[in-house]
Image (cartoon, rainbow, N blue to C red):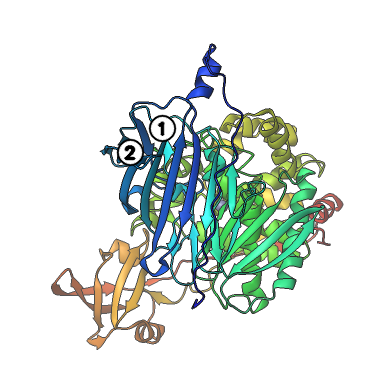
Amino acid sequence: MLTIATILFMYQEPQARPKPAKEPKTRAEQTRAATPEIAYTVTMSKPATHLLEVEMRLKWPAGPQSVDLKMPVWTPGSYLVREYARHLQDFSAKSASGQALGWRKINKNTWTVDSKGAGEIVVSYRVYSNELTVRTNELNDEHAFWNNGALLLFPKDQLKAPSTVAVRPYGKWKIATGLPKVAGQTNAFRAENFDVLYDSPFEVSDFNEIAFNVQGKPHRIVMSGEGNYDLRQMAKDVAKIAEEGYKIFGELPYTDYTFIVNLRGGGGLEHLNSTALQWSRFGFKPQSRYNGFLNLVAHEYFHLWNVKRIRPDALGPFDYENENYTKLLWVAEGVTSYYESLLLRRAGIISDKEFLDGKASMIEQLQARPGRFETSLEEASMDAWIKYYRQDENSVNNQISYYDKGDVVGMMLDITIRTASGGAKSMDDVLRFLYNEHFKKGKNYTPEDLQKAAEMMAGKSLDDFFTKYVRGEAEIDYDSIMNGIGIKTNVTEPNKGRAYIGADLTEEAGKLTIRAVAADTPAYEQGLNSGDQIVAVDGYRASQAFLQSYLSDKKPADKVKLTIFRFDKLRDVVFTLGGNLRKDYGFAPLDNPTAEQRKLYQGYLNAEL
Ligand SMILES: [Zn+2]
């Protein structure tokens, strides 16, 4: 709780930029002349109201008659239309001399201001900010966290324009952001264009922080909130992860990097030279949970290459008003997920066995989804906008996660390339190629570019692999791939003899309800529905604990009477129990691995097979 009196910060105007030619002649000069100077000021005078106050100043050498100001509908990295404009209120516009200007809304996210040729206009509004996620805004008496894409309007057709953001923090709060400071000014930052501005979240609070260098470049971790973390140890581990990224690409393509961590909820969002993370306050012990945090750090950090610079076709420059469709989210997200624990293994934070166990459990989850036969990786990527962030009870049956299957297929592609090239090439080479030949030459990459790069490294066609596992829904033949590095899958059916219903249940306030029903289960075959409330089994009150003990005495093919509420009507169902078919997946060494297999395993995981 903050009890410090608000300090008023003097705000200075941004430094004047060179004036454009007075009488533009060429088209380029005309465009330049039409670009306004854009300066935002963000104030948080009443944190308890959750209202961030924004002032936006636009200055032109020759002002237009009207100007359209727009709020993005989404923010890159989180592929869902979130309609940030719904939180904007108290909009007003005036000239620099204080004369009110007319304005109107022309669609959900556009405000048209009648600027009437004024050389400078001042627009003010407030944005309700009471949702802490990595892609939304929060202001309260503990802190302010925001994404510029969810707070700052952009002038239509001016996404290439530079801007400045001056922040007036509440009390003695400090500021963390990846944006560079405006020279000579306090609490003012600059962005060279809107893709950079909208890529740079702010945390403003009384945070803890630690600074460290990696390859001579400054990095800092900003922790908003108290928790059971050891900041010094964290800095050491995060530096190791960054070093492993550096080893792959041979450079750190930023001047500095900021990790912003809020200690509530979970998740992360990647940016060019920063990341916003959320983790639970006491989630840094024991080591296994701390490793989960480091996985998250590695994921978002690795994105600075994979997606922020190695960019899929449609992902940048961005269209902030519509969906940006790509078939490559499985690479952007799934391959990044694959590299999370690979970086931790290379940094020596986890063992080769821990790495393989993690990947085996990912395979186990994929193999338990009937949806793997319905949707390919490319389809799941395209449909992220309508499916991934809007999962429902049928998702298990008709969808896969491009994160999880992308992780698995990324691993299979890596091992395929390693095996085909005798260990000379790997997925590192594919990503390095895309970085050097696409990003550095100003080009995004397409699905065809990716396949070509992978084939170049493998030294052979991978069309069969891509047709089956990337563009298709074929069952993955794990052993034929994993054998290349001397590993086989161990598949067991530990609960086969145990009776089960096969529905995904949830219990809340004493109510046992079916959340989802996977295809091929007894519940699916016998018509149980998501939303059904199971009231009793054989006349006894149903609960998770009761079901577990009661069914442990039953066998597959035994019958029970389920009493359920479907909507508001009670009914009895005679239900035939089935046998649990869920399989456990693990990896184990082949019985007699060859010298080549041992060599490839060593090269892959830096350990003896
Ligand atoms: Zn990600």
- Residue closest to the eye, 350 or 560: 350
The x and y percentages for residue 403 are 53, 52
Disc on the earlier residue, 2 or 1: 2
Task: Report which quarter residue 431 is drawn in.
Answer: top right
Q: Residue at 66% across / 58% down in the picture?
A: 298
Circle number at residue 234: none
Task: Report which quarter residue 417 is drawn in.
Answer: top right
Q: Mark 2 points at which residue?
A: 110
Q: Residue at 52% across / 75% down in the picture?
A: 4
Q: Is residue 197 shown left or right of residue 567?
A: right
Question: Judging from the image, what secondary structure is the residue with disc 2 in?
Answer: strand
Q: Residue at 50% across / 18% down in the picture?
A: 30
Task: Answer few, some or many: residues within 10 Å of disc 1's Cα (few below 14, many 20 plus, some between 14 and 19).
Answer: few
Amino acid type, callout 1: Lys
- Residue closest to the eye, 546 or 204: 204
- Residue closest to the eye, 35 or 441: 35
Q: Badges 2 and 1: C-beta atoms under 8 Å apart? A: yes
Task: Report which quarter residue 385 is drawn in.
Answer: top left
The x and y percentages for residue 240 are 77, 61
Q: Name the residue under label 1.
A: 156
